[in-house]
Amino acid sequence: MPGTVGVTTGDEAGGSTGGAAGELRRTLTFRDLVVYGLLFIAPMAPVGIFGTLLAASHGAITVVYLVATVAMAFTAYSYAQMVQVVPRAGSVYTYARVGLGEGAGFVAGWMAMLDYLLIPAVAYLFSGIAMHALVPSVHQWVWTALAVVVTTLLNLWGVRVAAVVGFAVLALEIVVLAVFVVAAVVALAAQGAQRGWAVPLTGEGGFSVTAVLSAVSVAVLSYLGFDAIASFAEEAAGGARRVARAVLTCLVVAGVLFAVQTYLAALLAPMSAAGLAAKPGEQGAAFYTTVDAAVGGWLHDLVAVSKAIGAAFAALAGQAAAGRLLFAMARDRRLPGAMSKVDAGSGVPRRALLGAALVTLVAAVWAARRDDGLDQLSSVVNVGALTAFALLHASVIGWFRVRRQAEAPSMLRHVVVPVLGLAVVLAVIVEASATAQAVGAVWLAVGLVVLAVQYRGRRRAAGPRA
């Protein structure tokens, strides 16, 4: 590729770095990459926020997910652009470092770290809550901790083993989703829809652009996780183009699954969007209420079990991505060097994975032991990823246009697309909760202090200039 000489060679292309850094093994297939992405996203991610989005969009929930898919496509495309420039572990940290400079790269990695460490904690907590509902005699924090231990062991076993087990779990989730789709179609054929067939697209009482866009700002968070695929760039057999294709494929597949399930559920929902808006307390269980009313309790239980297992393995994918991020930052001496070592037997960054698992375990168990733990944890997990996405889009412009590393930069691909993606991301950050914004600001401030200390240390080590 023109203009990438000196960037994608040597250790930056995933070869041996020598010393303590080691080498990640290229064993992941295209299917494995898509599996990791879909596991992290979860095929039935809309279940938990179905009622919230139905109410917020005035019933036009399917349009919300179609628009959200298009909105996140800008970010997916920017990932696909940069992973071919720098096919290294570390994802957005590495891209910002190359496209914008060392400082911006550290900030991007630091903000992404918040997301990659806490999103798995939320997923583990979801798993613990679901298992506690099925086996009330065991406290949810015990189930939560057990999920962390089991998935961590799988990740330590090796990336191929985790991918194979993850594929089996993803297949289970897809089967459950297919059962829901078939059951919903049968119910619609037998009982008819609760509202007009076009309502999930047009809304109740007329289409509201404002309402849909407001709901989109929440719906895009369902897609967080597809970006984790880029973290495995050094472990993908077939090169960077395969990783780029996997990122885009994962987003499209997730968008189709989200649109289909929300369309069917919206047709069957016993309560209108206005009714849900008037009763916020019933929004969280709206999908399960719909399943109970239209199909029966057996499907409710099946979906609950699938969500319990699927959440734990969504966390597995997130934990694996977090480990690669910590590994990449440690290899560049932005984090303690011990985490840059690769285990000779499994070929995974064992210490980085254990570090990520420890932080996630503490956060998940802390939240599981509090009544408001889920609200506290889930309110802060998104700003880190969104800030990193913003720096990703800026990196595309910085690499292709400002630094002019391409022979013929494209105005559409290298300016228009990332600017549109940046606008979407900033709009979602503005709509985020005050708590999330505050935590993101504090985490950013701490990161800037760490960066300043590192910069000062490097200047001292370099000594006075001649």
Image (cartoon, rainbow, N blue to C red):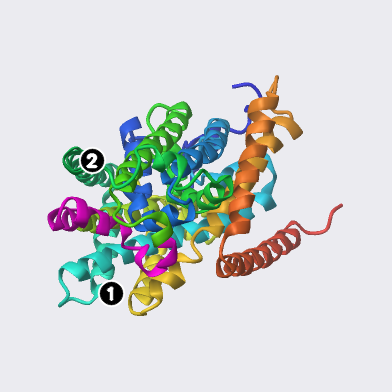
Amino acid carrying mark 1 in the image:
Trp
Residue 278 quadrant: bottom left
Mark 1 Cα within 10 Å, few/some/many (few <14, many 20+)?
A: many
Where is mark 1, residue-wise? 141
Magenta span: 276-302
Mark 2 Cα within 10 Å, few/some/many (few <14, many 20+)?
A: some
User: Looking at the image, can residue 143 be seen?
Assistant: yes
Give how far across and how far down residue 360 sits, in percent.
39, 66
Check if residue 378 falls in the magenta segment.
no
* Disc marking residue 181: 2
Quarter of the image where the N terminus is located: top right
User: Looking at the image, can residue 98 be seen?
Assistant: no
Along the polypeptide, which appears first: circle 2 or circle 1? 1
In front here: 105 or 23? 105
In front here: 284 or 248? 284
User: Mark 2 or mark 1, which is nearer to you?
Assistant: 2
Residue most toward the left?
A: 298
What residue lies at 20% left-to-right and 69% top-to-bottom? 133
In front here: 246 or 27? 246
Residue most toward the bottom?
A: 370
Check if residue 286 falls in the magenta segment.
yes
Amino acid carrying mark 2 in the image:
Val
Helix, strand, or loop for circle 2?
helix
Give how far across and how far down residue 179 sits, in percent.
18, 42
